[in-house]
Image (cartoon, rainbow, N blue to C red):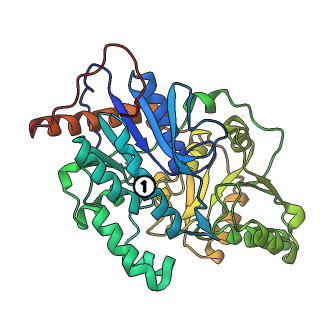
Amino acid sequence: MSRTDAVPPAGRRVVALVSDAIYPYHKGGKETRYHQVALGLAREGVEVHVFTMKWWDGPDERTVDGVRLHALCPVHEMYHGSTRTIRQAVLFALACLRLLRFDFDIIDADQMPHLPLFTIRVVARVKRVPLVVMWHEYWGADYWREYLGRLGPVAGAVERLSARLADETITPTSTTRDRLVQNGAPPQSVTVVPNGVDLEAIARAAPSAEHHDLLYVGRLIGHKHVDWLVSAVAGLASAGSAVTCAIVGDGPERPQLEALADRLGCAERIVFLGSRSDHDEVFGLMKSARLLVLPSTREGYGVVVAEALACGLPVVTTLHDENQARLLVDDGVDGWLCEPTPASLYSVVAEALSGSAPRREVRDVERFGWGAVVRDVLSVYDRALTRRASVGAAPRSAPTVPRHAAPR
């Protein structure tokens, strides 16, 4: 099922958004999506409560930009190296039982990690409210085996079972939708709602005074293959190019990447800028660069690619089947696609730079806007609530006075 034009219901709804990691404490595509959706829902009159780990100091509850944040548990380490920890998934799954203490009309839960979805499904049944799950990507058994080794088949089975838990599922790409349906999700319950970008922030951002030929923005973890980019810079420098590269982001791979740049003799060509909390600064870097390079072999959507394209910045990314960001790039028009190998990345980047990598005018830039995303999410909520009401569990009447979800 693709985007729907249904009109959301009138009246105030109370929505529980459940995600272990949230923006700006943890930065990534899914965190950005939930942050923008939460803000957009609040602007539409929805009472939004985000349930997460305690990323902030002070009381367990706080209100930010009209959105109420609730800490279900302390922050548990999410990664061991570049691999998600099972311990964190288990602890957050148990913490999600605390949702039973709150009242809401609908639960919108993040698919990753998968284990909490089983707890949240129980909560939804007990509370008699619909469960919507946001699936960013479906990995499948082969990738889980590569990711976790001998535990891969178990994780693959958990993923397959969790794909069937939601009353409604939202996913950013048709590829993920097809994989969910193939693994048991009812076709009529899966809706494609692409991610968005902050068009207003992009419009107001001024080009940075820092000018770099190549730009990378994202986590520094294994499947992003930033080492391929470092090697490409080294190759270009050896060939006589005065290429420069900025790497925005942080992660467990950073020390190895810095060491690789030193070893290949291109450290003076690459600047590691670390994480940047100011989106305007990142958009400014995009507006002053010549190419965004995303060597990743796994992206559930690729928000950074949509942001770059909206800034008029051409993109180089890989043709890997698990890289859904490739679907945003029109090869040869607003970017280039390469094979998922270091040699192909080097060749395509060299070709793009040799053609001066002109800035591009984005066609139909409004398709990237968050307003359309929020309207579509509300339509999915409406459908979920209507279906739940039709089987005898009508949602509670919306309160006439704004209130916070409160413990029983």
Q: Nearer the viewer, residue 17 or 324?
A: 17
Q: Nearer the viewer, residue 332 or 159?
A: 159
- Where, quadrant-wise, is the C terminus in this rendering? top left
Residue 280, position as x, y percentages in the image: 69, 35
Residue 128, position as x, y percentages in the image: 21, 41
Could you tell whether 397 is left or right of 255 in the image? left
Please identify the residue farthest to the left as the structure is shown: 391
Residue 92, position as x, y percentages in the image: 47, 57
* Residue 1 in sight here: no
Could you tell whether 22 is left or right of 288 in the image? left
Residue 194, position as x, y percentages in the image: 40, 45
Could you tell whether 326 is left or right of 241 in the image? left
Q: Nearer the viewer, residue 29 or 247?
A: 29
Q: Residue at x 24, y 61 (%)?
A: 181
The amino acid type of the residue labelled 1 equals His
Q: Nearer the viewer, residue 112 or 215?
A: 112
Which residue is the site of mark 1? 136
Quadrant of res 16: top left
Q: Residue at x 28, y 67 (%)?
A: 161
